[in-house]
Image (cartoon, rainbow, N blue to C red):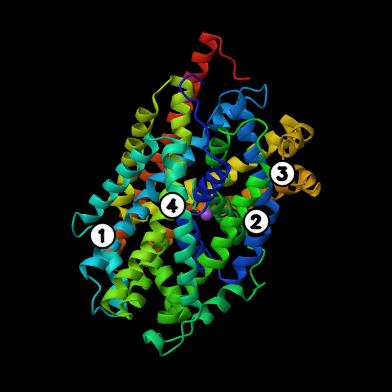
């Protein structure tokens, strides 16, 4: 706690920073793609159930855990968790809360940098006169690094994050959120209206934007019990709310011990869902369907996967508005994404910075550089081997699975070890709303059971992934030697990515162990 005595500037600033943490590329790019990959109407029911039964309870839990640990001068999950129990092992569960942020930041910052690249290309007129398919293919070009530009924008993005982080919470993070969040909502509303009102024949669209909405909102019960869909829905809820990550605990550890958490948590959480469901669900899917139809959209997503859909399809729409408006609209859309992204990647930087400051007395600036450098090293494979699925591999293990694992353990700690009686006191102390008592029981019984079910039920699919079962099947079915060579390379890079992530986790655990020994030597207790 020596060098780390920051706090938030104001309540509005805190809520906007927390909303900025949550509202991110997940809302505009990841949500639509997850929904599409999991059948649209099949996805949305598990998604909403996960929000109510896991998302909201975990927001209460994480906000209050963070404020609790903050009292003892902890700003990252290893020692926040440690302060809640006498058992030594919880601090190693807390390793996830640093690990995930670094590993997600590693691919997230690359994604964030595409927005700068696309603004650049829109202004430079790259898309002028291109056909629908040319615009879509440009993304493949961009990410296959046919020139050095994507790397330059990526480095700019890393430096920008590092610089803002080095300016601290109220001086850096909070300021960016106060400018970025209102702009983002304004741009989002404009684009959502455009998406939903797209009609065949206008703007050269072939289908209606509302076809896309129907695809998403017509419930489909045929695969409702598929564990894969539930893991994806749970993963998306965690990712989008930033729960199961450690970044909420970090932000709320800078609260004072009697500050409200209940209302703040709900404000930021519901703001995120509004942006995701009402804006994020009404831009990429309707506009893509408008130009490609449902089948075309499915093909785009399945062929190349991942989060690039909003880059492949929107610039073509903007082209229909003439050169000047096309630039304005691109700046609006990619600017929106940029603000959404940076307020989130800043949040990913704070847990590891807090850890270095608390445990090793690092100065904030140096801690920010440590974050920038780590993310640069970890991110390099996602940049260089993007087309071998490394990026999606990070997103699966760090951006989906480990959130669910961490959330499962932390809620057991909170409700059963720390104890629900004390836990409920933490949630309600200083609360500016009356938290419905039902959440006490949901947190204690329902959330852990669903989390446990999702974890166990998704094990076979995860095992197949580790064994590369799907890729080997593709190899067995392929005849073209070039295709086979490509698949073999994919397997190799994905294995390397997994080993790298594992090494990161172990590295952080070793640092936690060293920090713990140091505390014992110095007689600094965690609580
Ligand atoms: N919630 C953010 C999004 O939706 C992502 C994020 C993950 C932010 C982890 C902070 C920490 O894009
Ligand atoms: Na989000």
Return the disc, 3 or 2, that comes first in the chain's sequence: 2
Q: Does residue 447 lie above or below 420 as drawn? A: below
Mark 4, other Cα within 10 Å: few <14 / some 14–19 / many ≥20:
few
Q: Earlier in the sequence, mark 4 or mark 3?
A: 4
Labels 1, 2: front one: 2
Residue 427 screen position, x and y as percent: 71, 39
Residue 71 coordinates in the image, percent (x, y): 62, 26
Q: Earlier in the sequence, mark 1 or mark 4?
A: 1
- The residue under the point 65% across, 56% down is 51
Residue sitting nearer the eye, 486 or 89: 89
Q: Decide: few, some or many residues near mark 2? Use Cα within 10 Å; few <14, some 14-19, many ≥20.
A: many
- How many other residues sit within 10 Å of disc 1, few (<14), some (14-19) or many (≥20)? some
- How far apart marks 1 and 2 lie (CA) works out to 36 Å
Do labels 1 and 2 touch, CB within 8 Å? no
Instruction: Please indicate whether residue 446 sits to the left or right of residue 71 in the image.
Output: right
Q: CA distance from mark 1 to mark 4?
A: 33 Å
Disc number for residue 432: 3
Residue underneath mark 1: 144
Task: List the residue tagged with mark 4.
Answer: 179
| Residue 51: mark | 2
**382 w.r.t. 363: above or below:** below
Q: Earlier in the sequence, mark 1 or mark 2?
A: 2
């Amino acid at each position: 706690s020596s060098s780390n005595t920051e706090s938030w500037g104001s309540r509005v600033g805190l809520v906007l920073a927390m909303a900025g943490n949550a509202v991110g590329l997940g809302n505009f790019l990841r949500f639509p793609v997850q929904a599409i990959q999991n059948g649209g109407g099949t996805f949305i029911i598990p998604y909403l159930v996960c929000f109510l039964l896991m998302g909201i309870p975990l927001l209460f839990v994480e906000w209050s855990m963070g404020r609790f640990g903050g009292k003892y001068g902890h700003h990252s999950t290893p020692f926040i968790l440690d302060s809640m129990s006498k058992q030594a092992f919880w601090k190693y569960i807390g390793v996830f809360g640093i690990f995930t942020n670094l590993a997600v930041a590693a691919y997230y910052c690359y994604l964030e940098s595409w927005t700068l690249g696309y603004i650049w290309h829109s202004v430079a007129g790259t898309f002028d006169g291109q056909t629908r398919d040319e615009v879509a293919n440009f993304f493949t070009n961009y990410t296959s690094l046919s020139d050095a530009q994507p790397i330059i924008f990526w480095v700019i993005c890393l430096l920008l994050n590092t610089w803002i982080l080095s300016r601290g919470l109220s001086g850096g993070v909070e300021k960016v959120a106060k400018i970025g969040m209102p702009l983002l909502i304004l741009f989002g509303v404009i684009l959502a209206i455009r998406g939903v009102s797209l009609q065949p024949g206008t703007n050269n669209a072939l289908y209606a934007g509302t076809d896309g909405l129907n695809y998403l909102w017509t419930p489909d019960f045929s695969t409702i019990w598929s564990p894969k869909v539930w893991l994806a829905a749970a993963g998306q809820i965690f990712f989008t709310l930033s729960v199961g990550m450690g970044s909420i605990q970090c932000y709320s550890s800078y609260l004072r011990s009697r500050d409200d958490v209940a209302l703040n948590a709900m404000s930021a959480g519901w703001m995120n869902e509004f942006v995701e469901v009402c804006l994020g669900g009404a831009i990429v899917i309707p506009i893509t369907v408008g130009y490609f139809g449902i089948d075309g959209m499915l093909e785009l997503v399945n062929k190349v996967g991942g989060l690039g859909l909003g880059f492949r399809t929107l610039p073509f729409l903007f082209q229909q508005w003439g050169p000047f408006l096309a630039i304005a609209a691109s700046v609006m859309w990619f600017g929106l994404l940029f603000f959404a992204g940076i307020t989130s990647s800043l949040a990913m930087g704070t847990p590891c910075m807090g850890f270095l400051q608390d445990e090793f007395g690092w100065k904030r600036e140096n801690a920010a550089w440590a974050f920038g450098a780590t993310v640069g090293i970890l991110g390099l494979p996602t940049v260089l081997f993007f087309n071998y699925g490394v990026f999606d591999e990070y997103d699966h293990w760090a951006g989906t699975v480990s959130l669910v694992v961490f959330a499962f353990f932390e809620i057991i700690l909170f409700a059963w070890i720390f104890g629900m009686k004390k836990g409920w006191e933490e949630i309600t102390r200083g609360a500016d709303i009356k938290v419905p008592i039902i959440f006490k029981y949901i947190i204690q019984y329902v959330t852990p059971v669903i989390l446990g079910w999702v974890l166990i039920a998704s094990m076979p699919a995860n095992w197949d992934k580790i064994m590369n079962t799907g890729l080997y099947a593709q190899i067995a079915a392929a005849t073209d030697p070039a295709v086979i060579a490509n698949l073999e390379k994919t397997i190799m890079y994905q294995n390397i990515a997994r080993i790298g992530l594992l090494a990161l986790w172990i590295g952080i655990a070793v640092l936690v162990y060293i920090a713990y020994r140091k505390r014992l030597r110095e007689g600094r207790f965690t609580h």
